Amino acid sequence: MIDHFALSQAFDLLFSSFSPWLWVIPGLLIGLIFGSIPGLQISMAMAIFLPVTFGMDFLQAMLFLTSIFTGGAYGGGVTAILMNIPGSSSSIATAFDGYPMARQGKHNEALGLGLAASVVGAFVGYILLLFLIDPLAAFVLKIGPMEMVVVVLWGLTLIATLNTTSMPKGLLAGMFGLMLSQIGMSTTGVMRTTVGNPYLLDGIPVVPAMIGIFAASELLRLRGSNFLVEDKAQRDISMRRILLGGAQIFRHPGVLIRGSLIGALIGAIPGVGSSVANLVSYGEARRSSRHPEQFGKGAPEGVIAAESANSSSEGGSMTALLALGIPGGAATAVLLAAFSFHNIVGGPSFIRNQTDVVYSIIIGNLGQVVLLAIVGLLMLRVLGLVVRVPLPYLVPSVLALCAWGGYGITGTIAGPLTVAVFAGLGWLMRRNGYPVAATVIGLLLGRMMEGEVVRTLQISGRHPMAYLLERPIALVLFVIMVLVLVGVPVLKAWRRRRAAAA
């Protein structure tokens, strides 16, 4: 599976001089900062700093850009934990349990958990890429719209479990999000519910909506409080507690490994990426847990599942880029541009003719993961100080940042207006006990689901079930999904009855 001669050449390329590593730490810092600011996407940071790579050699450019990718994957989870503000759509599930932990004064432990899970998840993702790049490339080529329908449907099933006190409210909130996702021009070219507003032609912008319904609405709800963490004794940033929190991942090895594998496999599917991986991993952790009622209230397993999948999907997304020359998302599209700047074309010929460079990129990313653990620990002492800022100062400044982030995404007034509308909507939903996360999931995955369903119907001649039987990967995924959704609850109920009888 591994060309040992090319591997030794890769080590020579990486460690014969220090030049390939010069830009790695600056890249990690850039990624952490951009990932933790609402509205500033990782792909935006990579695109902004892409011109800097013109004067670099190819390997140095790739390590710099992928270090921004690596840092940003964790940066989005920091604000999700501290302020219930996912820095990107791939950190949504991190906020479900990370923020309740922070409100309970366990922000040190939550930050440590998130960092450790990110490091291990990213490491597993790149190890799998190193050993399985050829088989994974063959797997990706067999992924079609039917397979993506099953994966996205799996993510949507999380909606039903997000409100343990009232499942109907969770389903209503999710259906509302799905309805909102249908605004704008459909995949088939039909205009829907735009009410003559040109800003809605492309639908509701997801990131500004997410910023508004998650971040701004939470800040409005907190306006009567004094600090994010009310207990003064709990506001300190303790390196010891962060390290102890990080060590907790080893209490849940099953959750960690499962999340890493889910992230790597789903991340390898072009167009799906870390957002779906984050949600599917969280949903599976909750369904398989012996105490699912603790999720959403500060369960460490929730943070581990979300962050490990989020980070391991990075290695998966590199599979299609290196092996096929196909970008799996916005970030890898920027990396593909870097390929063209250096007159390199990704794909089978790239792997065959420049195997040493491919291995250099993968091993360099493994080194970045180790450096992320060090840089992340040092940065957490600074980023964690947000819990000591009085809310009368924090709320207006972060609200202004949210509005600015909304404008940065759309480039028009539609961004800040979307943030404001969804802030009010999120505040009303929270006040009446509706889970805002279910609405965000519906909005995030609804448009993706629609496009894949339309393509499936077109390919299958409007006979999707017959087509499903002809697609072995889709059929296996569908059977696994049904077994997980139906079999796990039935098995748990049977165990409870047997325990009660005993």
Image (cartoon, rainbow, N blue to C red):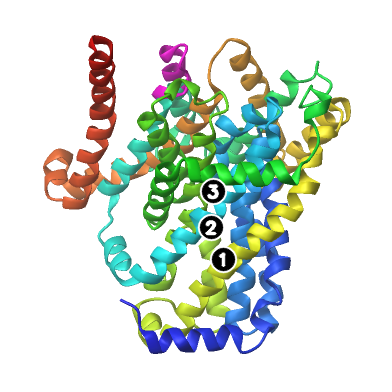
Label 3 vs 1, first from the N-terminus: 3
**How far separated are the C-alphas under marks 1 and 2?**
7 Å
Q: Residue at x 52, y 64 (%)?
A: 333
The residues colored magenta run 160-173
Query: Which residue type does callout 3 highlight?
Result: Ala
Looking at the rendering, which quadrant does residue 143 occupy?
Answer: bottom left
Sequence order check, earlier mark of 2 and 3: 3
Element carrying mark 1: helix
- Hey, what amino acid is under mark 1? Val
Image quarter of the N terminus: bottom left
Q: Amino acid at mark 2?
A: Ala
Q: In the image, what residue occupies the spot 38% across and 36% down? A: 284
Above or below for 301 versus 372: above
C-alpha span from label 2 to label 3? 24 Å
- The answer to which of 342 and 491 lies nearer the viewer is 491
Q: Give the alpha-carbon distance from disc 3 to disc 1, as whole Å.
A: 26 Å
Q: Residues within 10 Å of mark 2 (few under 14, many from 20)?
A: some
What secondary structure is the magenta-colored segment mainly? helix
Q: Where does label 2 land, which residue?
A: 330
Q: Mark 1 and mark 2 in contact? Answer it, CB < 8 Å.
A: yes
Q: Is residue 1 above or below residue 308?
A: below
Q: Secondary structure at mark 3?
A: helix
Q: Is residue 58 above or below residue 400?
A: below
Which is more toward the observer, 109 or 471?
109
In magenta stretch: residue 69: no
> Residue 396, position in %: x, y?
84, 30
Image location (x, y in percent) of residue 17: 65, 88
| Residue indicated by mark 3 | 117
Question: In what element is the residue under mark 2?
Answer: helix
| Label of residue 334 in the image | 1
